[in-house]
Image (spheres, rainbow, N blue to C red):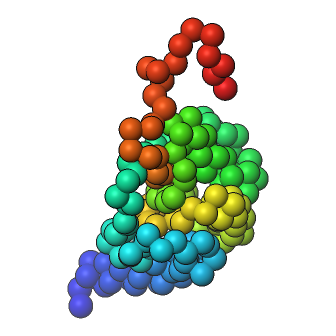
Amino acid sequence: MGQICAKRFVVLLAVVAACAMSLSEFDLIREFFSTSGQVARADVLRGIGDDGAVLQVPVDQELVLSLDTLVAGVHFPADTPPGDVGYKALAVGLSDLAAMGAEPAWATLALTLPDIDRQWLKEFSQALLQLAGTYQMQLVGGDTTRGPLTISLQVHGFVPRGAACYRSGAQSGDLSV
């Protein structure tokens, strides 16, 4: 093996070793966001662990979706406790569903992390899943990537057909909270 090839081989081994020591996406999901730690809804036909969720919307209902993104240093201080970040990420979406008159059902989470910090993930996921359980919501999927700390959470809820509350329906004198 030539000198250049040997150097490339050593670099390749270092990369493989670094990857082996890190948590894979599937391990991260299994350890922190598995279905065993959350509400199990009958309308979730396939949730976390597949390429997509398969969900059943009741016939007499409409589906309401809301997506919010929180970026460290923009939407919360970078040193905010992880449990507070997890709670806020879901609370923002729950507020949107309530404003539309929808009952919470499901959530999807896209989590971008600068590195794998097990304690941070444990506190974040516990707070998020605890709040989700309070509203009988199930986390049904998402994505993880590496980069600056960013949390995007999409909430899904039901509203009876034709009963959604829209901003355009507000009238002068209505209380907006």
In the foreground, 118 or 103: 103
Position of residue 43 measured from the top left corner of the image (x, y, whole percent): 44, 69
Number of marks drawn:
0
Residue 161, quarter of the rendered image:
top left
Q: Residue at x 46, y 46 (%)?
A: 159
In the foreground, 36 or 173: 173
- Quadrant position of the C terminus in the picture: top right
Position of residue 113 measured from the top left corner of the image (x, y, whole percent): 54, 58
Position of residue 125 measured from the top left corner of the image (x, y, whole percent): 64, 65
Position of residue 126 measured from the top left corner of the image (x, y, whole percent): 69, 67
In the foreground, 104 or 120: 104
> Can the viewer see residue 115 in this picture?
no
- In this rendering, position of residue 8 left or right of residue 145: left
In the foreground, 61 or 21: 61
Q: Is residue 173 above or below residue 80?
A: above
Q: Residue at x 48, y 74 (%)?
A: 42
Q: Is residue 21 above or below residue 150?
A: below
Q: Residue at x 41, y 82 (%)?
A: 16
> Can the viewer see residue 119 in this picture?
yes
Residue 74, quarter of the rendered image:
top right
Q: Residue at x 48, y 84 (%)?
A: 20
